[in-house]
Amino acid sequence: MKDPKFVHLRVHTAYSLAEGAIMLPTLIHKLHDMGVPAVAVTDSANMFGGKAFSKYAADEGIKPIMGCQFLLRNADSDDIMKSKGRELDPDKLVLLVMNETGYKNIMKLMKRFYLDNTEKGWAPQLTLQNLEDFNEGLIALTAGVDGTIGRLLIENRKQEAENFTVKLKEIFGARLYMEISRIGTDKEKQTEEAFINLAYKYDIPLVATNEVFFLDESMYEAHDALVCISAGEYVSNENRRKFSINNRLRSEEEMVDLFADLPEAVNNTVRIAKLCNYLSKKVNPLLPIFECPEGKTQDEFITEEAYKGLDERMRKAVYFEGMTAEQKREIDEKYYSRLEYELSVIKKMGFPGYFLIVSDFIKWSKGHGVPVGPGRGSGAGSIVAWSLKVTELDPLKLDLLFERFLNPERVNMPDFDVDFCQENRYKTI
C-alpha cells in the first residue's frame, strides 16, 4: 500500500449502537480496496468491536488503531444537580491506544466509566481525575465542537475553554491533539479559529478528522432512519438530531483538499497512526471454573449429573407402559450411546464447565419462580443439555443433530439460546 497523506481517526461502526451503520468486515474490505494502510475505530462509549477490528484489519494488511469516544463529566453538572436536580449532558473526548500500556489503561477507564462512576448516581462518564490516573500510553483528541473546549467556546466562555485546554495539556502533554473537523456545521465555523489559536498558543498539534457513521452517500437515508428509530422520532420531524451527508468515509484526496490551508492538521493524522502500535492478541475463551462438590473434576461431575438426569428423563418421558425387556434394551442403547458420545466430545473440547454453569443457573431459575423457555436453536440437539435440564426437548425423538451445536471438526464456543421471563429475569442476573 502507498504511503498515506491522511488517516481516518474517527470511524464509528455498528458497535456505536443505533448510531453507526457500518459493519466491521464491510469497512475493512472497503478500506482495503481504497488502499488505506491504517484506520482508527472510535466507537461511542464502548470497544465491543475491538477484538474483531484488530483481526479483520490485520488479516487485510491494514493497521488497526484501537480507541473510544468517551463521555467526559461536564463540570457544570454538579451545580445544576444541586439547583435543578438533573445532570447536564457530558462532553466527549477521544482516546487512542498507542501500546499495551495504553490498552490496559483504556480498559481501566472503561471500568471507571461503566461501574465506578455510576455508583455516584451518574450516567456512564469519565472524570478528569480518571484521566490523570490512567493516561499513559493513550493519545487524546479534543473531540472538536463536541468536546469540553468546543462547548465552552460556543457558550462564549473563552477563559474557561483556555483553562481546560491547559488542564488537558498537563495531563496528556505531547499526546494531546487539538481536533478540528469540517463536516459543514455552524458550530465548526464558530469555533475553528479559536481552536487554532489555542493550539498555537499552547503548542498543541492540530489534527484533522471527519467523524464517520456510514460509508457513502447512498447510505445516508438509511442511517438517518436508524437515528430516528434510536430516538423514537419521525423522519419528517425537522427538530431532531441529524447528521450531515459528510459524515461518510471521505477519501484521502477529499480530506487533503478540504484542509489544504492547514496541511499540518492532515499530516498529524499520519503521525498519530505511526505512534499507535498495538495489536490485540487473539486469546482462547476464558471460562469461569465450575466448582464441583466433593473434590470431583468437571469431567467426573458432568458425567455423573448427565447420567442421573437422563435416568430421570427416561423414566418420565421415554419408557412406556407394557414395554418388553428387548424394547427397553434397544431404547437404552440408542439414548445412552448418544449420551456417551456427546460427553466424549464435550470433554475433548474442554466445555464441561460451560454445560454445568448453564445448567446451574437454569435449574436455579426454575426453582425460584423465573420461567425459562424450553430451549431453541442448535443447543436443542444435545442430549446432555436435555439430561442437565438446560433444554426440555428430547433430541432423539425429534431427530435433532448434536453436531450442529458442537463439532470437534469446527472448534467454536457452544451457544445456548435461553429465554427468560422478561419480568423476573433480573433475579437470575
Image (cartoon, rainbow, N blue to C red):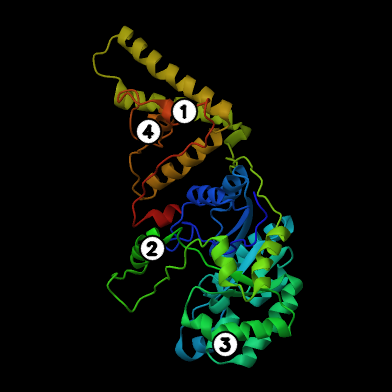
Instruction: Indicate which disc, 2 or 3, sits on the residue closer to the N terminus.
Output: 3
- Assign a secondary structure to mark 2: helix
Say which of marks 4 and 1 sits in front. Answer: 4
| Residue bearing the label numbered 2 | 220
Q: Residue 200 or 102: which is nearer the viewer? A: 200
Report, in whole angstroms, how far the alpha carbon at label 3 lies from the one at label 1: 66 Å
Q: Check if mark 4's residue and mark 3's residue have beta carbons within 8 Å.
A: no
| Residue bearing the label numbered 4 | 380
Residue 30 screen position, x and y as percent? 51, 50
Can you tell which mark lies on residue 153?
A: 3
Report, in whole angstroms, how far the alpha carbon at label 4 lies from the one at label 2: 41 Å
Instruction: Indicate which disc, 1 or 2, sits on the residue closer to the N terminus.
Output: 2
Q: Residue 222 or 401: which is nearer the viewer? A: 222
Q: Quadrant of residue 323?
A: top left
Report, in whole angstroms, how far the alpha carbon at label 2 lies from the one at label 3: 30 Å
Instruction: Indicate which disc, 3 or 1, sits on the residue closer to the N terminus.
Output: 3
Mark 4: amino acid: Ala
Say which of marks 1 and 2 sits in front. Answer: 2
| Residue bearing the label numbered 1 | 306
Report, in whole angstroms, how far the alpha carbon at label 4 lies from the one at label 3: 59 Å
Q: Check if mark 3's residue and mark 1's residue have beta carbons within 8 Å.
A: no
Q: Residue at x 66, y 87 (%)?
A: 162
Say which of marks 2 and 3 sits in front. Answer: 2
